[in-house]
Image: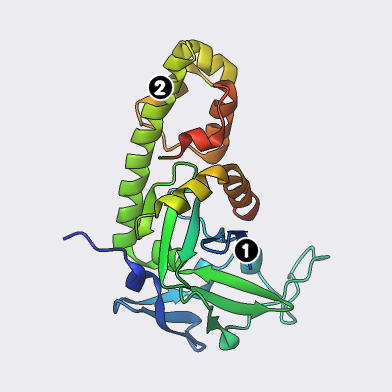
Amino acid sequence: MPKILDNGRFRVYVYANDDNPHHLPHCHVYWDGHDRASVASLPDLAVIAGEALPRAARRYLRANVAVLLAAWRRLNP
Amino acid sequence: MKKNWDRAAMRFASARYVDRQGMLDATFENGDRFLVAVESILPAASRAPLGPSGTLAAGGAVTITPPEWGKMRIGETGDVLEVPAGGDVIEVPWDRIRSVADPEFRAHLADHAVERARRMGGRIRAMRLEAGLTPAALAERVGVPRQVVANLEAGKIEPRSDLIEHVAVALGRRLRDFAEE
């Protein structure tokens, strides 16, 4: 499973084979189990789909955005 | 009316492989249903032409095991399909399927890309000015023609991740500085 980050509250995945026609790097964020989710582009963290990111999630992603973008480039060359 | 890309638009209600047609039949919780040729949603390596034994047809030191579509299941998050392939599992996230099969989602991605380019361009321009650089000086540091920087700042380029990284280095910034607060 390509889970990249997990702080106990938010889980962040970057999938291989997840490119799109606009080559938008992005990550999938889950919280409250799997009931709530967002897809956010990298490194800008604008929400593509799903719910607005809670402030704590945004802080967490922002602090790790370089790790997420590196994972995207590795998994979606 | 613009579609609401909410959780129901991400989660699969069902997914099955139609063996006779080589198609994936996927229905989302919001009722959207798509029939997709499976080769269009697989990683490039899994799309290589295969011989009858599943090995590469030509040139082949590499062996690729074909995905076992009959054993496909919906993953625990509800929005990813998992397909066993040898000892591995190929994961197909919901947005991969929609970006291939759903013109509404592709249009949504296009809108997002345009808006992202505009915002990133504005941010890059502000950072450049803060750094006291001319567009020509930034272009030189990044190693691109000056017009690229002009287009980037004007939001006319959908910046790829490597270009963003080079701009960040040239401006003495970290990638997190490009993230919305």
Residue B159 in sight from this viewpoint = yes
What amino acid type is highlighted by mark number 1?
Pro
Instruction: Give the answer, above or below, for where B27 lies relative to B138.
Output: below
Instruction: Give the labeled residue for mark 2.
Output: B125
Q: Chain of mark 2?
A: B
Q: Position of residue B152 (x, y in %)?
A: 42, 27
Q: Position of residue A26 (x, y in %)?
A: 49, 52
Determine whether, in the image, residue A61 is placed left or right of residue B123: right
Q: How is the image coloured?
A: rainbow
Q: CA distance from mark 2 to mark 1?
A: 34 Å
Q: Which quadrant would residue B9 be assigned to in this image?
A: bottom left
Residues at circles 2 and 1 in contact by the CB criterion of under 8 Å: no
* Residue drawn at the location 79% of the way across and 66% of the way down: B62
Q: Chain of mark 1?
A: A
What amino acid type is highlighted by mark number 2?
Arg
Instruction: Give the answer, above or below, for where B165 lies relative to B95.
Output: above
* Residue drawn at the location 58% of the way across and 49% of the way down: A68
Instruction: Give the labeled residue for mark 1.
Output: A2
Please tell me whether mark 2 sits on a helix, a strand or a loop.
Answer: helix
**Residue B52 disc label:** none
- Where, quadrant-wise, is the N terminus of chain B in this rendering? bottom left
* Residue drawn at the location 48% of the way across and 73% of the way down: A33
Would you call the spot at circle 2 few (<14 residues within 10 Å), some (14-19), or many (20 or more)?
Answer: many
Would you call the spot at circle 1 few (<14 residues within 10 Å), some (14-19), or many (20 or more)?
Answer: few
Residue in front for this viewpoint, B20 or A34: A34
* Residue drawn at the location 40% of the way across and 22% of the way down: B125
Residue A21 in sight from this viewpoint = no
